[in-house]
Image: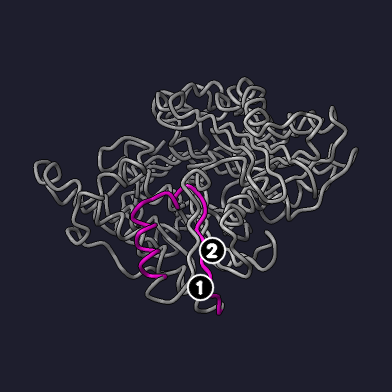
Amino acid sequence: MLSLTLTSPATTRRLGRVLAGLLEPPCLVTIEGDLGTGKTTLVREILRARGVRGAVTSPSFTLAQSYRGSGGVVLHHLDLYRLSRGADADLFAWDDYLGGGAITFVEWPAAGSEALPPADVRLLLRHRTVRSREAEVHAAEALEACVAEALRKLGMAVERPAGERR
Amino acid sequence: MTGAILCVETSCDDTSAAVVEAGRVRSSIVSSQNELHAQFGGVVPEVASRRHTELLPTVVADALDAAGCAWDDVAAVAVTTGPGLIGSLLVGLAAAKAYAYARRVPLIPVDHLQGHIAANYALGVEPPFVCLVASGGHTLLAVVEVGVRFRVAARTMDDAAGEAFDKGARLLGLGYPGGRELDELATRGNAGYAPFPRAVPHGRDFSFSGLKTALLYDLRGRDAAEIDVHRADIAASYQGAIVRQLVDKTLACARDEGLRRVALAGGVAANSGLRRSMTERCAASGLELFLPPLSLCTDNAAMVGLAAGHLPVVPWPEYLAIDAYASATQAKAARRPGVRRPNGRRASH
């Protein structure tokens, strides 16, 4: 686990660019956090960095939006907010959005916890002050190390709790 | 296009059908799934699709009945092909293709946004005009040049305005989606009570995600008793900030584009604060305002027929290749036969 403080929306976007450079399809990324913690901001920056042009808006209403990035990589952006109150998530067409060489981002993943395979990357965002957020990145050891190194090169302080180091 | 157009709209959770002839709405039936989805706190796509399948035949029969129209009078079938929930769209599109095939009449595919804009043709608006299209899934300024052909002059960079209302309602403890409850509560409150940011970045474009966060932190800074007493005031302040941005940017667009006519469309156009403010500000600026009745603002099939009158008809068998699309970015692929959508599902032909 990596933990870091995002001191502004700009640092949230910086984390997005770092992650974008390290994600390899097929890949499932879940993003947890309350309303207003910057989940969509983070995903938008990753999509931009992967070459998605045009508007990247919140998929809360449509539940899923699909994009094509550079190199033809398919990127799905899901938001299960509207399913988050015990809806019958079994009915959602998960297979359309998982695997198949795509990178899939899922906001509010709790409603899909039964249907979703374990995430390759789990991102947690928490409110700290009006502008700043606490972030956690959970991923495989090697990927976490790469993310930490890339963030430190950008001058961001990253903590890796000793107990978590394998 | 002469003769009666049978219209079908199933882009989200309302099943609707209408008969429109020569730009006149002869009937419009909307069967809302609101109660069904309230128990889930939102629209569940696959549940919505199944309900459309069950409801559509009845809704279509009701629309024909209400118009005093027989199947033999139907000269074309118009249907929304996107953007929207893909499963819901596919139900309406498959049904429309079947109706067209059975009656040997052409099909008219209609974009949902063009439909919303065309609702204003029921009021006799003449292009060019600027149309604010605001709903749960869309927020944009369309410059309508001729018919339903439009150019996007501004769009939201993050959340849609309707989403800002619905999520704000949830933060205020009004349930989700609660845009309508928020509007009702706001009418009893003082819009000057809580300060929300006036300046909005992104130039001509809209942004509502920062307002949502500002509401969250405003509420966090108050104790529960204060929120209870002033919930209506906070709701009015928050709604005022959303409305101010919508009106400011719409009027700025009209000014920049040199347009004297302003129109509203989409579910958010039913918001009383927006209707009042837009009416006052347009009057003050000498702009002519078109406010469709509430029944033509929220999703309905009559608007599909009003748009269809301005669009080309697609004959058999070409219309079999028409696909539905979830988002505007996928619209082009859906119009090209044989191109698969990224999510791999297709309309059944």
| Above/below status of B14 relative to B125 | above
Can residue A7 be seen at all in this image of the molecule?
yes
| Above/below status of B52 relative to B174 | above
Q: In the picture provided, is B257 more to the left or to the right than A7? A: right
Q: Position of residue B305 (x, y in %)?
A: 68, 45
Q: Position of residue B240 (x, y in %)?
A: 30, 59
Q: Main secondary structure of the magenta part?
A: helix
Q: Position of residue A154 (x, y in %)?
A: 43, 64
CA gap between label 2 and label 1 equals: 8 Å
Which one is nearer the viewer's eye here, B330 or B126? B126
Q: Which residue is mark 1?
A: B253
Q: Which residue is mark 2?
A: B141
Can residue A43 be seen at all in this image of the molecule?
no
Which contiguous range is marked in magenta?
A: B258-282
Residue placed at 63% from the left, 59% from the top?
A51
Q: Position of residue B249 (x, y in %)?
A: 44, 69
Tell me which chain the residue with mark 1 is part of: B
Tell me which chain the residue with mark 2 is part of: B
